[in-house]
Amino acid sequence: MKTTRLLLGSGLLALCLGASQAQAQTTLRMTWYSDGNEGEVMTDLLRRFEEKNKDIKVVLDQVPFKAINENLPVQLASNQGPDIARVGDLGGIAKYMLDLRPHLQNPAYFEASYGPFLSWMRVPGDTSSIPGYMTQLTVTGPFVNKTLFEQAGIAMPGPKATWEDWAKATKEVAAKVQAPFPIAVDRSGHRFFGIAIGQGAKVLNDKDEPAVIDDGFKRAAQLVYDWHKAGVMSKELWGAVSGTAYRGANDEFKNAQVVMYMSGSWQIGQFDKTIGSAFDWVAVPTPCGPANCSGMPGGAALVGIKTTQHPKEVARVIEYLASEDVAAEFYQRSLFVPGHLGIAKKGLDYKDASPLGKAALKVFSDQVNLLAPAANRLQGYVNNRVIFNATISRLGQAITGESTLDEAYKRIASDVDQQIAERNKK
Amino acid sequence: MPGVEPLPKTTARPSIVAWLGIPFVLAMRIVDYPMRALQRALGEQRMAYVFLLPNLIFFSLFVFAPIVINVIFSVTGGPALFPSERPFVGAGQYAYLFDCGSYLDPSTCREDHFWRGVANTFRFTASQVVAMVLLSLLTAVVLNMKIRGRGFFRAVYFFPVLLSPVVVALIWKWILQRDGLLNAGIIGLGGERILFLVEPGWAMFWAVFVSIWAHMGFYTLILLAGLQAIPSDIYEAAEMDATPRWRVFLRLTLPLLWPNLIVVIVLALIRGVQTFDEVFVLTGGGPGTATLMIVQYIYETAFSNQVQNFGLAAAASVVLGVVLCLLTGLQLALSRRKAA
Amino acid sequence: MGTTLSRILTSRRRAGRWHWTDVAAYTYLCIGVILMFGPVAWLALSSFKTQAGLLEFPPTLLPLAQKEVVVDGYPQPLPLFAATLEDGTTRHLAQVRRIGIVAQMVDPSDPSQQFRVPIERRIPVREFSLATSNYTEPLQRFAFMRFLGNSVFVTVVATLITLLINSMAAYALSIYEFRGKNTAMVLVIGTLMIPITIILVPVYLVVTEFGLVNSLWAVILPGAATPTGVFLLRQYMLTLPPDLIEAARMDKASEWQIYWRIVMPLTLPALAVLAIFSIMWRWNEFLWPLAVLTKTEVYTLQIGLNAFQGELQTQWHFLLAMTMVTLIPVAIVFVFLQRFITTGIANTGMK
């Protein structure tokens, strides 16, 4: 007992001493997750920042993505958060974000470069704050294994083709070359809306309240449901796990088992690296529905956190990273679609990418301009993850036969209502 | 008297233990002074409280207090983290959980995932406990035979116990996946590929299988301990009577093994109900919700959704706690009666 | 290993004669060896495969990688294939590039000879090769030694605390008769059933209250009072002869002395078992440290090694390799302590 106390005491003491050593310069903590090599790129950029700004030290704390969605909100709610964090759920975290505007040298630059995305990071009603910048803009869209089409001797549908055209073509290709997945779609509500928006789903009503189940939504749900019945999609993705769990088909695609893979721009980096010359893969514009040919935007932002002791320094770090040259280098080396209007307009030269990768990045960058208003509104909606989660969870159950589509619609609507009601309980 | 025999082993242990022993002995000697003083003040029997105290402090801080907070969570709502900021909703969360058309059909419940979790956990635990007891008993009996390399085989069966649930699940997921080792074997033998984790029946089977694979060694050793504690003269007597071996097993061995079997059943039962990470990493609760366990439901309700619903999760965990307590009470009562 | 096996295989119940139960027993045990060790061995082999090798079906047993050759006139090494030519002969050719479904290939020994081969008529030539970069790449990215040190600290200190306080509590609950004993027992058994997963948020609040977030103590302390440990040790201490303690009391030994000089040594096998379990629990802990540790300098190995798990992909080659890394201490504990574990529970405990 006594020894325990002693141990405890000395341990705590040691920790306190350790913590107080680094007071000479300001140390900022940045919580970061990586899908590819962007962590290394960020480490480089921060090192360069520190050389120019000797009074600030930024420590990059890399965590698994799981921690960003599940643990970071709890840490933020208990005031234990970092100074800066890279987050994907912009709406959900918005209330913890720091408004950098008063500390920025050039807020107008942020408005001009990141303007439309800043509203994704704001709580409803806020029209002015600048919480951070986009480390990455993503767009959903399909990748196609062109070599499989060639081997099957079937022509690829053209740029304005519909999902129905693609389903038919990929099914034929898959049958000829014996690929198990004609179409694979990530198991993710976000990707589902990448199809549903084109089918005419509006998701929100005029008052910005969720009205998820409409004809467009149903058309998309029916489409996906029928694909599973007809063998165009395999149950291995949407049917394999429960709840909101994500499941991708990147390994299957890399292994030439998928003819068309509906995912998004973030896959380019690893496809470029791992597929090599094994087959030709191309990104194609999102197939069209009756409403439009839009995918879903998304992305991650690097934001300051309200509880930081050093708002000025946080602003300096973010202002440096968000500056045009630095941001451009970051996007370019990570093979990301730029979330910066100026850079997007000029176009980026992805030096490290292969011709296939470059072509794909071009396709996705062009898709940004084709996004439907409904898609942008949904991405900016503060509770969008509630909608995504309910959708994927319930559609998954319908696809495995645990419920009918109609039941799924009812449950999606009631899940969304219940969670938003819970959020609004004060 | 099983406790006394291993002593000679301790004396034969190498000198590292002695080196570790010196600070230990010193610390213990020093602690003896205040302890003696306490003993003088409290008396011999009440020293029990002193011995209990450190554990109790940890229990109260990190188990009891959280349970109390959990109960508070369960009667409050909203997204706030600190109990003081959460509005009181009475039995609202419980009412929501129990809002069912029929408790036997989860799809009639408002919170159907909870009830599917309950049903799955029940099925999982029941089949897992039965299979676990039978298999570990069989293994213990085999290991108790006069066999060369017994120590080696014991170790082999125990090995997976040391792996973390996540690793266990990962290993098997890697084997069971579409292009995994098992499917390669099946196709190599001319069979058809089976999507083990996509067929509900298979997924549940593998969840149970993997859980048994991982934990069987522990239960086997408990039973083996019981088997070895049975004095051999009993068997000799039976052998002289020429009683068939299976009858010896049923009439003599099993009753003598009963206390160990109780331990195995209780622990396997509790573990089964608590199952989470193993199955979660293996199947993700799927296909559909076929292997969604109740603890996974609680975890996801609290963490995975955008609105982290601590209230509902806490209510579900309180329900789970009550059920577990009832189960254990039942078990204890049963074992008492058997023992008496 | 070989000799052990052969000895195992040639031994039998009574010299000279095989009883059918022996055959059954050995068959059962050998299947057991394959079933228990096989999956782990498979993991180990897989962790040395390249990303492409992992995707292959049917999977190869050993890690193989495609052979590359340097051909005159080409700056990069070229992948080597066994190509079946139109005349039916098979030759080893290096692939220069692939255009659609046709590969352009050269003979490595005579680069002037060019071939056009349909891609389905060429098979990669492979050789045994360990993809050690699965290990080195992530390990270089992180402060591996730091994480290892943290993990070891947590594991050792937590196990020591657990052994001490659990054995004290078990001692109280097995030797004494006192008021509230039953309540205490019920509480112990009750908490046996609370998985930390379901009280994660409240425990987090308690830890925050103590200001322990981002301290290793936040990982060590909450799990120190394990109900399983108390239960296990108590069951074991109940088997100790009461006379022993009475005799010590006659000799004027203090209660504390009885505890550490008499009961503790006698409980050693059970303590060893608990120690091993505690080591495993602490070493493998993931969800809880992930919630309370957010700074790199306090990461444990399990968190550090999982940090490459992104939102959108599982990098299997890293995941398998890093899993192997976390298994190494487990393997060491197993090799050195397995005798302890098996005889610890088996010879005595849990009655």
Image (spheres, rainbow, N blue to C red):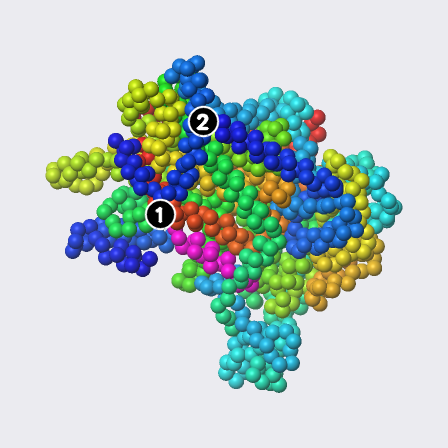
Depth check: A320 or C34 in front? A320
Dividing the image into 4 quarters, which one contains the N terminus of chain C?
Answer: bottom left
Out of A378 and B306, give the one closest to the viewer: B306
The span from disc 2 to disc 1 (Cα, nearest Å) is 39 Å
Question: Dot 2 corresponds to which residue?
Answer: B30
SS class of the residue under badge 2? helix
Dividing the picture into quarters, in which one does residue A315 lie? top right
Pick the front one: C47 or C87: C47
Q: Along the horizontal axis of the image, is A151 left or right of A23?
A: left
The structure residue drawn at horizontal position 82% and vertical position 39%, both measured from the top left corner, is A129
Residue C301: x and y in percent read 55, 46
Quarter assignment of residue C120: bottom right
Give the residue displayed 65% in from the left and 81% down from the top.
C73
Specify the segment rendered in magenta.
Answer: C36-53
**Residue at screen point 59% across, 43% down:** C299
Q: Earlier in the sequence, mark 2 or mark 1?
A: 2
Residue A420 to residue C14: above or below: above
Does dot 1 land on a helix, a strand or a loop?
Answer: helix
Q: Taking the image as drawn, is residue C111 in sight?
A: yes
The image's mark for residue B155 is 1
Q: Position of residue A264 (x, y in %)?
A: 68, 54
Dominant SS type (magenta): helix
